[in-house]
Image (cartoon, helix red, strand yellow):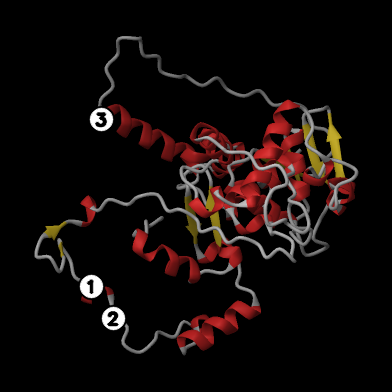
Amino acid sequence: MRTRVHPSDNESTLEDFGEKQKFYNAFLNEWDCGDDLGELTPEEKDERYYERGYDLFEKTEPSGSFSEEQLPSGPVKSSDNFTQSSESLSVGPWIPIFRAPERAYAYDVGSYPATQTLYESFGFTPPLPVPVVHPHPVKVSEGITKIFRSIVGMHSMDSAFEASTIFQYCQEFLEAYVKGLPRSELFDLSSGNRQPLAAAPRLKSLHIIKDNLYFFDINEGTTGPRWRVAVTNSMDALFVCRLPNELRPRDICRELFNRGIQFHTLLDLRPVPRSIIPPTLIPIRLADYQFTKSDYLAYIQERDALLRNPRIGRAALMRGGIVWRLTASQVSFWDIIRGPTPSVTLH
């Protein structure tokens, strides 16, 4: 179950989770945080232990904690003597904070959601080192900024980012990308780039099947899953190649799942004849039909009935897009990394 955090607690909540336990959702302009998204590093565990004065990993509660029964119920009373129910609280969009890079160091594209999206999806790489000012700065209009926000999937951005040199390079990259080819310094598909994608180790494991299936022949050894990860188009294949090299197949699945990208898990099996799929009756409603709450409740019941089938739930999660959105809150990610269901191995 997902719980929305009040804007005043955004920063402290993000600090409570490790780097692998939080993911920025560019579609909804929000962070998803959870202990089940990843493990803390040993350094993060030590840091939490010394900061909080107790060991979180032995499930020891700090002194002064209180139980759920002690929490106040009903409307919340503020210091201004007015009553406000929790349902009426207005939660605005959270704006990620941008920190300009030191001129002597490389800019980490993963430090801000907009540049991370540009790198992972389009191949943007900032210059090294980042100049204090862009050599040919241009004034960016509000209309162009809105288009940029739409491309990277952000409702709003930090004003410091919009005024930064990095933003100027982002605009230069996108303008050149639309017109044809960005200069090699900014584009990782160029041979003259400082970190060309052609040198990515994961690219060597990429295979193409019938022009519409791109699978990566990597595994985790004898203890890891026997299946392989596959995506359905070249853009998603390049996205996987840009992910950190230390990610295992199940970690790659997590990254694809978190972004709603369609993918498959493949097993090496001998060919089997196609089975006949029984026809499904889909109700038809005419154009003048008036939908009611009963229709929605019927949809919920039918969806839940379908997702109780592990094969359907797993396939829906890996489908991506709107099907992934409708399924993500009902089916666990762990159903994916278990690999194909046993039925596929029965011949």
Task: Give the quadrant of residue 269.
Answer: top right
Number of the front mark, 1 or 3: 1
Task: Give the quadrant of residue 293.
Answer: top left
Q: Indicate the position of residue 195 as horizontal and vertical percent values.
A: 84, 52
Q: Kindly check if marks 3 and 2 are in contact, taking CB atoms under 8 A apart as contact.
A: no
Q: Which residue type does callout 1 highlight?
A: Leu
State the residue in front, 256 or 186.
186
State the residue in front, 16 or 101.
101
Q: Kindly check if marks 2 and 1 are in contact, taking CB atoms under 8 A apart as contact.
A: yes
- Image height check: is 289 above or below 261? above
- Image height check: is 284 above or below 11? above
Residue topped by disc 3: 293
Give the CA separation, mark 3 to mark 2.
40 Å
Q: Kindly check if marks 1 and 3 are in contact, taking CB atoms under 8 A apart as contact.
A: no
Would you call the spot at circle 2 few (<14 residues within 10 Å), some (14-19), or many (20 or more)? few
Give the CA separation, mark 1 to mark 3.
34 Å
Q: Secondary structure at mark 2?
A: loop
State the residue in front, 34 or 1.
34
Please state if 45 lies on the left or on the right of 233 as rendered.
Answer: left
Q: Secondary structure at mark 1?
A: loop
Q: Indicate the position of residue 81 as horizontal and vertical percent values.
A: 9, 65
